[in-house]
Image: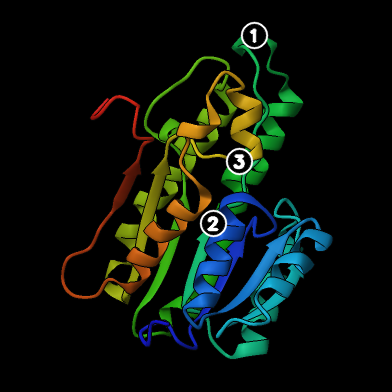
Amino acid sequence: MSEALQDHVAIVTGAGRGIGKAIALSLAQEGCRVALAARSEKELHVVAEMMEEMPGEGFIVATDLTDEAQVAALVAKTVERWGQLDIVINNAGLGVFAPFVDTTVDDFDRIMAVNARGTFLVCRESIPHLKARDVSWVINIASVVGVKGYANQAAYTASKHAVMGLTKVLARELQDDGVRVHAICPGGVHTEMVAAARPDLDTSVLMTPEEIADAVLFLVSHRGNAVIDEIHLRRRNSTPFG
């Protein structure tokens, strides 16, 4: 367990499965108290139960990130329970994959509402509490498509480019307040979303959610004058510096 993270308070969105679940468990293993946010309360209960034998603690806050009032309640309940907020992980994401001309307006709007607007809302509600800490973190889980483009992923790619834009602005605005703002841009990770987007990929060569969680732990454990803006992670057999 890391003494540096013991008793820190974190919010993790999309914590019920995949990358979010792995991040939440890793933080709890290091002694963090973690507010678990997702729409499925059933999935969150599974994660919270896994934390019962860990140094940290889980707190379930079922949240629809498209609902502004629910996002505000997520942050308020977290601070009310533990009196502080140190780490915000914006991980929740929605993907619908189709050729550009077959992408519906409803699908585009739903993806943007969760991936971009949801990230915006969580950050906006969290910032006053993060500023109150000596050091705090916002880590936005973007994607390789936040900096590149792939066929059949127009809406998802647009949403992750939006996340990258929000991250860059926040980093500038919060620099003098001790809030470290980072983006993690993973390539192929073995999750349900990637399986839907790229059924052609051999899952044995994909990164694991735990490897993304390792990058998060590195960022929130890092101290000193050097600040890491972005981490790009690719699967081992993909093109280097592509």
Marks 2/3: CA–CA distance? 17 Å
Among the two numbered marks 1 and 2 on one chain, the one whose residue lies closer to the N terminus: 2
Q: Residues within 10 Å of mark 2 (few under 14, many from 20)?
A: many
- Earlier sequence position, callout 3 versus callout 1: 1
Residue type, label 2:
Asn
Which sits earlier in the primary sequence, circle 2 or circle 3?
A: 2
The image position of residue 183, as x and y in percent, is: 38, 51
Q: Please name the residue that numbered disc 2 is placed on.
A: 90
- Residue receiving disc 1: 101
Measure the alpha-carbon separation of dots 3 and 1: 26 Å
Amino acid type assigned to the residue bearing label 1 in the image: Val
In which image quadrant can residue 134 be found? bottom left
Q: Most extreme residue toward the top, as rendered?
A: 101
Q: In this rendered view, identify the residue nearer to me: 214 or 131.
A: 214
Mark 3 element type: loop
According to the picture, the residue beneath numbered tag 3 turns out to be 191
Residue, x 52% and y 50% (percent of image)?
Answer: 209
Q: Is residue 43 left or right of residue 23?
A: right
Could you tell me residue 76's position as x and y percent? 67, 78
Label 1 Cα neighbours within 10 Å, binned few <14 / some 14-19 / many ≥20: few
Q: Residues within 10 Å of mark 3 (few under 14, many from 20)?
A: some
